Every structure is written in C-alpha cells, then in structure tokens.
Image (cartoon, helix red, strand yellow):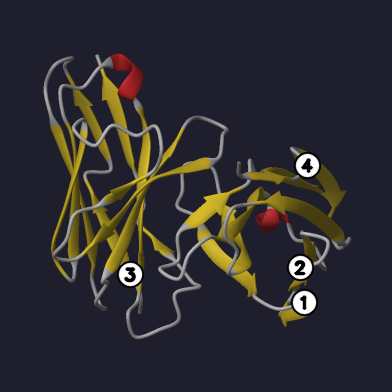
Amino acid sequence: GAVVSQHPSRVICKSGTSVKIECRSLDFQATTMFWYRQFPKQSLMLMATSNEGSKATYEQGVEKDKFLINHASLTLSTLTVTSAHPEDSSFYICSANDRGRRATEAFFGQGTRLTVV
Amino acid sequence: GQSLEQPSEVTAVEGAIVQINCTYQTSGFYGLSWYQQHDGGAPTFLSYNALDGLEETGRFSSFLSRSDSYGYLLLQELQMKDSASYFCAVIRGSQGNLIFGKGTKLSVKP
C-alpha cells in the first residue's frame, strides 16, 4: 500500500510553454501533498505544501505565479510550471502523507525530469 | 535559518557498519527522518525519531539527541544494494513538511 504515482516521468518542452505534472495517491487519501525540486547530485528542496481544497503554501523564494499548484481532490495534486525557462529544468518530486497514518512517513512519487529547451 | 549538515560521501565494505551523522538547525522541529534514494529514483522512508534515543528497524537504526540537535543513521551488515544517497530530514510542522539535508552518498565496496 501507500503508492504515489507521478506523471509524466520525463518531459521536454520549449521555452515559454507550460507543463503540468500530476501526483496521485493510488491507495490512500492524502489531505496534504508536497512538491520538491532536486538538482543533480543535490538535496530535495521543498517548494510548497498543497492542501486539499485550499491554496498551497509556498516556501520562501518560490514564485507562486510560476509554479501553480492545485489540490483538487484527496488523491490528486498538480504542479504547473508556467512560461518555462531552461533554468526550470530539474527533477520535480511530489510526496503525500496518508491521512490514516502518522504524518511522519512520506511517500514519494517517482519524480518528473523536466527539460526546457 | 534552516540547515542540516551531513557528510557528503562515505565509503565502506560489504558486511561493515557505517554511521552517517546529521546535525540540524531549523525553525520548527517535530522529528528527524531518514530517507534512502538510489540514482534517478524516489526517496524511500527508512526511519524516524521524535524523541531522544535509538530506533531500530532491521539492519538500520537511527538515533536522536534533541538537546544536541544531532542524529545519526547506523547501517549494519552492509550490502552492495545499500549503495545510495541517504538524507536526513527534519519534519518541520505538524503536516509533515520535510526539510532535507544535502545527502550522503554511500558507496559499498566488495
């Protein structure tokens, strides 16, 4: 149990276009999901906390108008990178906490490697 | 500010024991977690400490000292498949927000 599916796994897009990444909890309900960004050989940086039915909470320095987050249901959160630029190229990973379990164990999606050309 | 410090690389041989240390300084603290990540993969949960002391889960153990803002992950009976990056992460809030350290790349040699 506790599987998080993230789609797509890889995407290449042109500068100026937008890309949507989906994060789904397959066998549990997630009131809270998180979005991280990871550069090669570096740590995961928390971008935002996504709460079902409410606005996301963004970390300091993360542009909310550039990284749009929608948590429309208890099993789906989406991250849209708007007007993508090459510097947005990165590995984006979501995680979710099972509302039926303690919030101390996060379940991660497989990540999305975004390349902006 | 928020910072978590851990060694960048560790090398050990199969069957050995290795300890990965983590010191932290964060604005909120609910506990310290450890995650394993293989190249190109997703992080997977290993262990969690909310209170001082040792938590044991199979070959992996984790320790926390809140007064020292310090913890470690202990890996015993190392196997080749343990070669991966290991991240300590502070749970900053009640929702489970994770602040990650920079990661320790563990290489297990035959």
Element class at badge 4: loop
Between circles 4 and 2, the one closer to the viewer is 2
Reading the chain from its start, which is encountered first: label 1 or label 4?
Answer: 4
- What's the chain of the residue with tag 3? A
Quarter of image, res A50: bottom left
Is A27 on the left or on the right of B50, as rendered?
A: left
Quickly name the residue at label 2. Answer: B66
Element class at badge 2: loop
Q: Are marks 1 and 4 on the same chain?
A: yes
Distance (Cα) linking label 4 and label 2: 19 Å
Look at 18% across and 33% down and name the residue there. A65
Please say if A102 is above or below B5: below
Distance (Cα) linking label 2 and label 3: 31 Å
Quarter of image, res A36: top left
Q: How many marks?
A: 4
User: Contact (CB < 8 A) between labels 1 and 2?
Assistant: yes
Q: Amino acid at mark 3?
A: Val
Distance (Cα) linking label 3 and label 4: 30 Å
Please say if B41 is above or below A53: above
Label 2, residues with CA under 10 Å away: few <14, some 14-19, many ≥20: some
Quickly name the residue at label 1. Answer: B52
Element class at badge 1: loop
Q: Amino acid at mark 2?
A: Arg
Label 4, residues with CA under 10 Å away: few <14, some 14-19, many ≥20: some
Quickly name the residue at label 4. Answer: B7
Quickly name the residue at label 3. Answer: A3
Quarter of image, res B72: bottom right
Label 1, residues with CA under 10 Å away: few <14, some 14-19, many ≥20: some
